[in-house]
Amino acid sequence: MDLLIVIFIAVIVDAIWGDDHWIWKKFEHPVALVGRFINFLDVEFNRNEFSESSRTFNGFIVIIMSIIIIWFLSSIIEGLLFGNIIGNLILGLIISILLAGKSLFVHVKDIYDDFMRDDLDNAKINLSKIVSRKVDEYDESAITRGAIESLSENFSDGYVAPLFWLLIAGLPGIFIYKFINTADSMIAYKNDKYHNFGKCTAYLDDILNFIPARLSSLLLVFASFVLKENWQQALLCIKQDASKSPSPNSGWPESAMAGALDISLGGDNFYDGELIKSDWINGSGEKIISFDFITRALWIYSTSIVIYLVFVTIFLLLRIIF
């Protein structure tokens, strides 16, 4: 029951404030602090003078040592706080920081609002906050596609996976997941600088997201059914196109969303000045799409979160009973 209370507090706090709270305007966000630590590791252990084998070894050691330290410290925190009223409240507040439910919704909604104001330039700026690709030449259709792709992928990374690992391994689980996921976004690029140093991080991120990504796709299908979107096409698209993404995981929620809306996602994009070729997901769907699809995607996203929380609640109640 304590874990259910902690999750309830975390979900409510995230839904109300997200990242847009005065405290994060005054103090640095904890995830940003993790990013600074990862940047320090990058600077110190991924120097140009190191050989490829040394970079691979360094990347493995710093990540494994970080995981051990995080597990040790978070286990102590959990042991001290979990199981009493004040402790559960504090844990709920801590976990809310690691959920991206509202912040992701707001970021994508901002892009929709930019289109409503006919402000294409600001829509590009807001899209660049949630994707790492080059968006300078994007039109309405490309911006909309990028927003929906980010919404789909980050539904898994930013919400489903953190709660999943909290359920599986408690506070250490969600802490380690967020560390690896943040590190993956910073040092796991397939370029000369990070190919070796970020190899271990990339493998771990793929492993940790394997189940959540597939779970996310099913939640999106379920939400599509509830909202009377094209859930049959979502299922078909998952079966046919989930493996088309360069990532072994992101294609699952993206293909579910693409099928549900019957639009094409993916395709070629520029990342860090390099053209990354990718097949279309749901290639038979609409490729020239209007920004109105963002609203439908946000409805599917929000409904998926509600369904997920219902399943989490049922799971925890059954665990208490049995």
Image (spheres, rainbow, N blue to C red):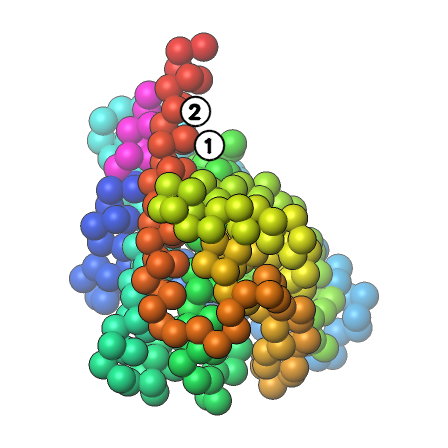
Residue at the spot x=81%, y=66% of the render? 53
Horizontal and vertical percent position of residue 27: 26, 63
Identify whether 223 is placed above or below 8: below
Residue at the spot x=27%, y=24% of the render? 84
User: As drawn, which residue projects farthest toward the left?
Assistant: 22
Task: Locate residue 187: give its quadrant.
Answer: bottom right
Question: In the rendered image, which residue does mark 2 sit on?
Answer: 315
Residue type, mark 1 in image: Leu
SS of the residue at dot 2?
helix
Provide the residue span drawn in magenta.
1-9
Contact flag, marks 1 and 2 (Cβ < 8 Å) = yes
Choose the circle earlier in sequence order: 1 or 2. Answer: 1
Question: In the rendered image, which residue does mark 1 sit on?
Answer: 167
- Is any part of residue 34 visible from this angle? no
Observer-nearest residue: 103 or 53?
103
3 within the magenta span: yes
Horizontal and vertical percent position of residue 122: 31, 83
Q: Residues within 10 Å of mark 1 (few under 14, many from 20)?
A: some
Q: How many marks?
A: 2
